[in-house]
Amino acid sequence: MPETLAALFLAHVLADYVFQTSWMVEDKARAETLFLHFLIVLLTAMATTGQVASPLIYLLALLHIVIDTVKVKAFSDGFAAHLTDQVLHLVTLVLIALSAPDLFATGAYTGLLWLPQVLLFTGGAIYATRAGGFAVGKLMERFGPNPIEESLDKGGFWIGLLERGLIFLLLLGQMPGGIGFLVAAKSVLRFEAAQDGKKAEWVIIGTLASFGWAIAVTLAVMFIAAQLPPLGIPALND
């Protein structure tokens, strides 16, 4: 079951955060765009599980589109809707994995015992960094535009991406103390902003949300990884 879940998780991450472009997100209300996204979800699931003809792969893609359609048609594109959308997608992955625990083992990659770990860590890295950027961005939208003047173009985006990536690596490498160093370093670098109440609150909320997302995702990945055959890297499998 964890092997199948790892494969399906990477498929979901690729479909939503790598191969889904910005224009697809903005144009998702159209049937043609939803069908294109359906194909992407289907093909990524086929690629990561090594299954082409399994009905559950097609069911997964269909459920994914149903969830997206309901979100687009019935809800605004805010943080709560975005988070609910992701939770429903992840629950769907778990249900499919529970229904067919041997889906990965009976696919084209049978015998590659190390592969599920690679799929899981790849999906986890993308979900902690890129997906976290979208989630934190949706959260911060409710507080208005960035109050920090003279910010670099997409500077906050890259800072968040890098800090979540570092947290992912630090936790996998069993160096959680390094997260405290990140907090201290960011506090020093953002000292000027902290002198203004509004700016300070903006930085604190964004930082805590970014760190919280990365930590939660990494801990979940580590929990699933513990159920998989070892990859052979002690720090990741202890």
Image (tube, rainbow, N blue to C red):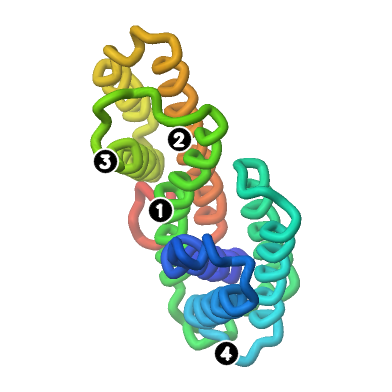
Q: Are marks 1 and 4 in contact (CB under 8 Å)?
A: no
Residue 164, given in percent of the width and then of the height, sits at 38, 40
On screen, residue 34 above or below 50: above
Residue under numbered circle 4: 52
User: To which quarter of the image does residue 180 belong?
Assistant: top left
Which of disc 2 and disc 3 is earlier in sequence?
A: 3
Relative placement, left or right, of 150 versus 146 is left
Q: Is residue 117 visible?
A: no
Q: Are marks 4 and 2 in contact (CB under 8 Å)?
A: no
What type is the residue that disc 3 sits on? Asp
Q: Residue at x 25, y 20 (%)?
A: 189
**Horizontal and vertical percent position of residue 223:** 55, 49
Callout 1 amino acid: Ala
Q: Is any part of residue 136 visible from this angle?
A: yes
User: Looking at the image, is mark 1 or mark 3 earlier in the sequence?
Assistant: 1
Label 2 and label 1: CA atoms lie apart by: 14 Å
| Front-most of residues 142 and 238 | 142
Q: Residue 2, percent across and down?
A: 59, 64
Q: Which residue is mark 3?
A: 153
Secondary-structure class at tag 1: helix
Between circles 1 and 3, the one closer to the viewer is 3
For mark 3, give the secondary structure: loop
Mark on residue 210? 2
Ranked by sequence position, the earlier of labels 1 and 4 is 4
Mark 4 surroundings within 10 Å by alpha-carbon count, few (fewer than 14), some (14 through 19), many (20 or more): some
Whole-number angstrom distance, CA of label 1 to CA of label 4: 26 Å
Which sits earlier in the primary sequence, circle 2 or circle 1? Answer: 1
Categorize mark 1 by other alpha carbons within 10 Å: few (<14), some (14-19), many (20+): many
Residue 224 shown left or right of residue 91 in the figure:
left
Q: Are marks 3 and 2 in contact (CB under 8 Å)?
A: no
The reply to whether dot 1 and dot 3 touch (C-beta < 8 Å) is no
